[in-house]
Amino acid sequence: MDEETKTLEERLRQLKGEDTTSSTATNNNNNNNNMGNNFTVPEGKLRIECRLYNFRGGAPPHRGYHYSNSITVEIDSTLTTTELLKEVKAKIDPNNGRDLSYYLLVKPLIGEEKTSALPKNEPLANVFNDSSKKLRVDIPMARGMVDVGTFGMMTTSPGADILLGKSDNISTQEISHLLSHFENATADGGRLQEFPEILNQEECDKICDYIERRFERAGVNAGEDFKITLQPNQMTELVSEEKGNNLFMLFDETCHEIILRRSISGGNFINFHTDKTLQTLNIPLNDSKSYKGGQLVYVKEDGLFYPERKTGSATLHTNKVLHGVTPVSDGVRYAMFLLYHGE
């Protein structure tokens, strides 16, 4: 058993109220005193929040683990430790049963305290004394799945030659071959919808100004691909409440996250990928004539689709639609994304 899995199992034993001082600990809640804690897991369900990630090579700052959004699953709190571990893997394994290792172990999620580390002197059981608290387990994500891809120079990624302009016309056979590299992409492309104008010029200019102010405050750490993550209740900082509600209504239910983006030239592109989030609304905030490159490319069953990116227009796609972005070679590209993660 690797150390990460072993540590997770020990913490889950604590969660179950089992003795962690012995490697032969079993599911016996009478051992609670060995932890110095009389906590008993309440009956019902435990909510486990899982965050998926992938690893990107290359040079810093692009090299490293890049995280997507979290999903929450429920597991039965009455399971034994062994059953609990199996259930966790079964519930959160996005790679269809492949053996996965767990990273970053466990942190409490209490309200907005998503970055708070678990206090070292506090048994994990104490984290679960309130039904609003969750256990977070971080696991690798399925290949090709990200949210709002990252600009980079990944020349060996599937379809990179297309995004670099070396292959404009591709056959249906080549389309099928490209789709085969991505587990979640489908031949029919899922839902892809265009909207000619959902924000006017004044609204787009206001959001671009907001991004610039945040970019300037970030200073040298901002980077070439600058992103701002907002919650839906912060939409009124950008547009009117009425306009925000109209945007949210484009989804099946509601919006869960807003991402603003400022990308400058550098010759990097966003490799083909599918999104982890169920639906994504992509809104260009400045005209494509104000920068060179940066074309959004969708892969459809009958070929490639390059939507016309007029200021304030939008495309809405599901997580089964394969897409990428060509290199930005000059100027600044602004965009806003609204994400719907599902229930």
Image (cartoon, grey):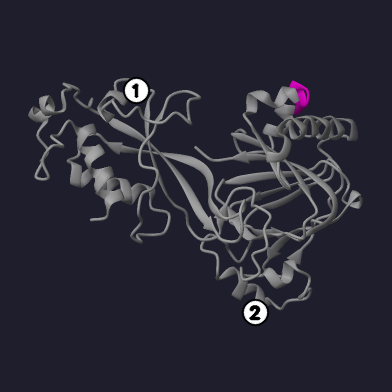
Q: Is residue 181 above or below residue 8?
A: below
Sequence-wise first label, 1 or 2:
1
In the rendered image, residue 277, in percent from the top left (x then y), is placed at 56, 46
Q: Is residue 217 magenta?
A: no
For the N terminus, give its image quadrant. Answer: bottom left
Please name whichever residue, 261 or 202, is drawn nearer the observer in this view of the structure: 261
Magenta residues span 238-243
Secondary structure beneath label 2: helix
Please state the horizontal and vertical placement of residue 83, each as a whole percent of the image: 20, 46
What whole-number distance in Å separates the C-alpha atoms at marks 1 and 2?
52 Å
Q: Residue at x 26, y 28 (%)?
A: 123
Mark 1 and mark 2 residues within 8 Å of each other at the beta carbon = no
Which residue position holds label 1? 131
Q: Residue at x 43, y 24 (%)?
A: 110
Mark 1 against mark 2, which lies toward the viewer? 1
Q: Is residue 207 left or right of residue 323?
A: right
Q: Amino acid at mark 1?
A: Ser
Q: State the residue lying farthest toward the right.
A: 289
Badge 1: how crowded within 10 Å, few (<14), some, or many (20+)? few
Which residue corresponds to the image point at 78% horizontal and 30% vertical from the top-left? 213
Which residue was labeled with disc 2? Answer: 173
Horizontally, residue 262 falls left or right of residue 148, namely: right
Mark 2 crowdedness (10 Å alpha carbons): few <14, some 14-19, many ≥20: few
Q: Nearer the viewer, residue 282 or 333?
A: 333
